[in-house]
Amino acid sequence: MSVDNDPWNLTEVGASEIVDLTQRPLDVISFDWVHYFSAHWHNRLVHFPVVLVCVMAVISLSFWNGDRRYWPLFKLLWGACVLTLTLAVVTGQSQLDSFLEGAMVSFAGWHQWGGLACTLVLTLAYFGAVFVPNWTKGAYRILCVFLWFNMLAVFVVATLGGVLNNS
């Protein structure tokens, strides 16, 4: 390898470049940590309920034949999913303004209303499941199918969010 193409060859580096390289870590101190920590909560929160919906859909397969061993865990995951989806909807409203003009306005609308619909459906179903003490085998099967369709809807909504995030 020639000396000209060697990225580690520092023979041509002057004193000012070395000072710049040593000062660069100090720029982190002047970084606005409060803004960075408080901004974009939607993007941080939304991945957790998406994973929970996937895990719940897989667990729901055990309900197909009436196996209820995982029902307490399932309800706990469902409650966590509802809570984090609600927080994701609320925090997503703060990022909506940046998409209200331009080509992404229809993606933003579909993402917003699709996310809200998934959240409302899962929330209403959750409260229905918590307050109904005895479920039949058929009800568990309906829940299984419902969660798989909801998981597909969440994937569509998440894909729209990914398009918005990368626009």
Image (cartoon, rainbow, N blue to C red):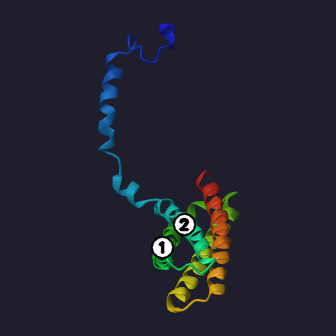
Front in this rendered view, residue 16 or 107: 107
| Drawn side of residue 95 relative to residue 149, left or right | left
Q: Earlier in the sequence, mark 2 or mark 1?
A: 2
Q: Is residue 109 visible?
A: no
Distance CA(mark 2)–CA(mark 1): 9 Å
| In the rendered image, the vertical position of residue 103 relative to residue 154, given as above or below | above
Residue 4 position, x and y percent, is 50, 10
Circle 2: residue type? Val
Crowding at mark 2 (Cα within 10 Å: few <14, some 14-19, many 20+): some
Front in this rendered view, residue 116 or 82: 82
Mark 2: which secondary structure?
helix
Mark 1: which secondary structure?
helix
Residue at image position (58%, 67%) is 58
Residue 97 position, x and y percent, is 56, 64
Q: Quadrant of residue 11?
A: top left
Circle number at residue 11: none
Residue at image position (68%, 62%) is 107
- Which residue lies under the disc numbered 2? 55
Residue 61 position, x and y percent, is 61, 72
Crowding at mark 1 (Cα within 10 Å: few <14, some 14-19, many 20+): some
Front in this rendered view, residue 134 or 10: 134
Circle number at residue 77: 1
| Drawn side of residue 51 relative to residue 117, left or right | left
Residue 135 position, x and y percent, is 58, 89
Circle 1: residue type? Leu
Residue at image position (64%, 66%) is 111
Residue at image position (61%, 89%) is 136
Q: Is residue 150 visible?
A: yes
Labelled pair 2, 1 in contact (Cβ < 8 Å): yes
| Drawn side of residue 83 relative to residue 26, left or right | right
| In the rendered image, the vertical position of residue 31 relative to residue 107, given as above or below | above
